Image (tube, rainbow, N blue to C red):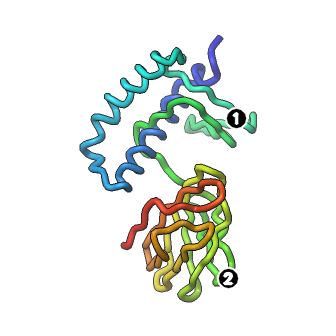
Amino acid sequence: MQTWLESHPRLAQALTQIAIAVLVALLGLLGYDVNRLQPYTENRLAAQASEARSAAGAPSRSATMRSASAAASSSSAGDTNLTNLVLSGDLEVDGWYTLYRQTPHTVTAGLAITPCGSFQPLTATAPTTVTAIVAGDGGDLLVLHNVDLTDAITVTEGSALILSGDAALGPDDSLILLSDGDSWVELAQADN
């Protein structure tokens, strides 16, 4: 009997491509030369992962997938839209992994930033300091991007914000965070 993922090979390929793009992006953020890693990522990592699965007695190249929402819809372009998709196994991406840009959040002093998705643009009405970001689930990735043309937004380190120091985000600066379930942990900061 085929799994749902095996019966949808285009979706399986797209999900696999997403994983590779995320891995390469994170390696780039950590300072690795991703142009040199690309052939290794595509060929050797795939071979090593396949060998490890085989040695562990795991099924080959198929991931287990469940959806908390059974509703799936297809657009006229052939894209499949799923809600609350959870994968266990390998995910590879061949192409772009896109974090959808949310509506810009206007930051107010004394109030927490409430992100609506992984890519959260920020604006302010004056230079502002923020001391809290609404907690995410463990593993959530958050990219804060100051799209304000003039005002700086400073995110201060605190008990639920583990940063390398206060993050002063001027226009077009970004802060990338990962949630451990209790706190947001800084992965990278871009001073543009």
Circle 1: is it few (<14), some (14-19), or many (20+) Cα within 10 Å?
A: few
Horizontal and vertical percent for residue 141? 55, 54
Q: Residue at x 42, y 26 (%)?
A: 49
Q: Residue at x 58, y 24 (%)?
A: 8
Vertically, is 97 above or below 44? Answer: below
Q: Residue at x 59, y 73 (%)?
A: 158
Q: Which residue, as the protein is rendered here, is positioned at the far left?
A: 36
Please give the label number shown on residue 67.
Answer: 1
Circle 2: is it few (<14), some (14-19), or many (20+) Cα within 10 Å?
A: few
Horizontal and vertical percent for residue 1? 65, 11
Please give the label number shown on residue 110.
Answer: 2
Which of 63 and 83 lies nearest the eye of the viewer?
63
Please give the label number shown on residue 114.
Answer: none
Vertically, is 110 above or below 37? Answer: below
As drawn, is 191 to the left or to the right of 138?
left
Whether pointer 2 and pointer 1 mark residues with C-beta atoms closer than 8 Å, the reply is: no
Residue 100 shows in this picture: no
Horizontal and vertical percent for residue 128? 57, 85
As drawn, is 36 to the left or to the right of 173?
left
Vertically, is 81 above or below 27? Answer: above
Q: Which residue, as the protein is rendered here, is positioned at the far front?
A: 159
Which of 14 and 180 lies nearest the eye of the viewer?
180
